[in-house]
Amino acid sequence: MDLALEHRIDTTIEHVMVSDPTPLGNDLLDPILAEIAQSSENPRDAASWITDLAKRSDKIREKALARLTERGILAADAGGQVYLSPGVSRIRRYTSPDGTITEEVQLRIKRTLFSGDIPDPRDIVIVSLASACGVFESILSQHELAQVQERIDVICRLDLIGREVAAAIRQVENLTPPPPPALPTGQIPQPAGLPLLGNVFGIAGDLCAFLLREYRQHGPIFRVRALHYSWVALVGPEANVFATQISPTHFRSWEPYHEFSAALGAHRVLLAMDGPEHLRMRRLLVKGYSPRTMESNLDLVHDITRNAIDEWPLGQPIGIQHVIQQIITEQIGMFCSGLSSEEYLDDLIYFLAMVIQMNVTKRTPKVMERLPRYRRARRRVTELYQRIMEAHQGERRRDQPLDFVDELLEASETDPQFLPETDLFANVLAPYLVGMDTSASVCAFMLYALITNPEILERMRAEVDAMYDDGPHIPEGLRALDVTRRVALETMRMYPVVPALNRTVSNSFEFAGYRVPAGAQVLLGTTVGHHLEEYFPEPDRFDIERYSRGRTEHLQPGAFAPFGVDRHRCIGSGLAELQIILTLAIIVHEADLELERPQRPLKIKRSPAAHPDDLVRMRLVRRRTH
């Protein structure tokens, strides 16, 4: 339709023909125009081209979204979510490439349908396309649709290209055989389990390995149970793609995570929010979780990491996970709140781990919150929160740059109904939770992988040392760390710290031939694809070449999802990746390390997130820079 509006092609039901092969300078339209021109000796009909282009719809959509984001019409958060930019969402207008002011499309089309306004040619073809694809059934009520159906039919007859493409779409739909009826939930395959216990040992042990094994046997959907809990498991790359597509209307996170929010005394925590409120909260938090937060604190992150390394004793065993948690937690505390959390580290680790295990993974009974150790840890964490709040009051913040906590306080003061004071405790602590149970664990696994792969370590060290020769404290230098970035990606593939996600089905759907009812609990096995040979050959081998330009195995749809999928994809993924890369770059530059027991297999603890066991220790062999 776009090509026809630009007078580049003409069409009938029988053939699509090129009337002007001159490129438009448009990276979406020009390749398609060139393909149509090349097929002029064997012309194809519109239905054939539509069917062919539909196979590339994901890539076309990604390019279109990227272009709209670059033009400021859409905004994208660090987790990959896109929405109307603040300016456009307020006035519902934006500037077109030709400089004219254009009304936002859905509002514009509805105005055309419910008034006597004469639509322009582009809106005519949009109405034709929307009508053929059933869009109006989604955005209008039955009463509204009946009211404007005659008007839709009139508009659809106004333009030849609109009529022909709409007819081609209906032709494709008529030629596509209907899928077989979906089987009921009770017929979804179920792995063998123990009486009463079900699959509890598989779920409580290596969950990713359990889901991978059952995926190989049953496919992308099966049922699992543990004690009195049961889930429908959606597993593998195809499930990731499907979940991303349907999540806004079919999944919610409140049920799996509301107890976690309540344990922190909060009503609104991003993890447990859904729908428009979730999107609004993401917009509110996105600045604090963006890579820019990291880029504006590079010197701080460097100094914290280097000071920690200076305290490592030469030749003595050091627990990898704990020292990395110390570094990451201190970084987060300083650039989010300006306050050191060093003296509260052990309390933070214990408190947040217990809250997750009691209220999310259910590995620990809630009676544990009555024990003295938990109560002490909660008091200490509350004390840290109170100190952060005191440091962000009135005159103390004068002439200080705004940080993450300042942004939260401003949001709370601006709209105390949406973000009341009672919700600040959980949201102020959220970056600590994100860091010490995800970023820190990835860093620890990455350090282990480097020590056990000395050739890769030397390649990474060479590019890091070269960056330091040019000055390490600039974002451009970090983005140039190609080997380091690929080591981080391979670490997240091989050692996913969050192998699966919990969701509740809000509206029934069909997947892989089965019907999943509203109210069912779903287990999204998001990282199973990381270990599938058909996506990542020799998946048990640490191979950073997977991410080189010639292979890019991680870009296969749904195959690589270390930060989750759907609308709840980790909001801090961009910040976390930069933090992981910089922290390990500093360690590699500053220290020569070795494992305490290099022959011992890596032992992994699975709770609250996967991380190296405390017995996985290293020694500082030499300080490289002083």
Image (cartoon, helix red, strand yellow):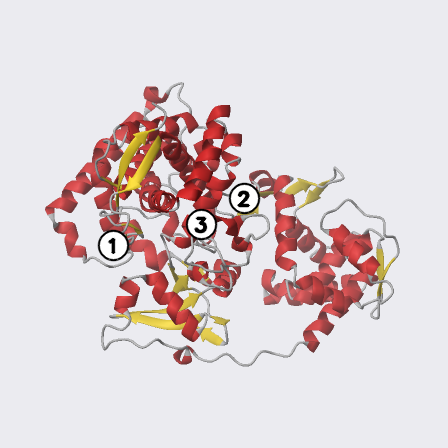
Of discs 3 and 1, which sits in the foreground? Answer: 3
Q: Viewer-proximal residue, 594 or 71?
A: 594
Rendered view: 523 above or below 585: below
Please say whether residue 346 is visible from this viewpoint: yes
Q: Amino acid at mark 1?
A: Gln
Residues under numbered marks 2 and 3 in contact, where contact means CB atoms less than 8 Å apart: no
Residues under numbered marks 3 and 1 in contact, where contact means CB atoms less than 8 Å apart: no
Measured in 3D between alpha carbons, the distance from the residue under mark 2 to the one under mark 3, in whole angstroms, is 25 Å
At horizontal 49% and vertical 27% (from top left) the residue drawn is 474
Rendered view: 1 above or below 335: below
Of discs 2 and 1, which sits in the foreground? Answer: 1
Q: Viewer-proximal residue, 317 or 204?
A: 317
Of discs 2 and 3, which sits in the foreground? Answer: 3
Residue under label 1 = 357
Residue under label 3 = 490
At horizontal 16% and vertical 46% (from top left) the residue drawn is 374
- Percent of width and height locating residue 241: 52, 61
- Percent of width and height locating residue 77: 50, 43
Rendered view: 235 above or below 374: below
Residue count near mark 3 (Cα–Cα under 10 Å), binned few <14, some 14–19, many ≥20: many
- Percent of width and height locating residue 6: 82, 51
SS of the residue under disc 3: helix
Measured in 3D between alpha carbons, the distance from the residue under mark 2 to the one under mark 1, in whole angstroms, is 32 Å
SS of the residue under disc 1: helix
- Percent of width and height locating residue 377: 18, 41
Residue count near mark 2 (Cα–Cα under 10 Å), binned few <14, some 14–19, many ≥20: some
Rendered view: 606 above or below 481: below
Label located before the other in sequence (2 or 3): 2
Q: Viewer-proximal residue, 188 or 473?
A: 473
Q: What mark, if any, has residue 76 been given in the picture?
A: 2
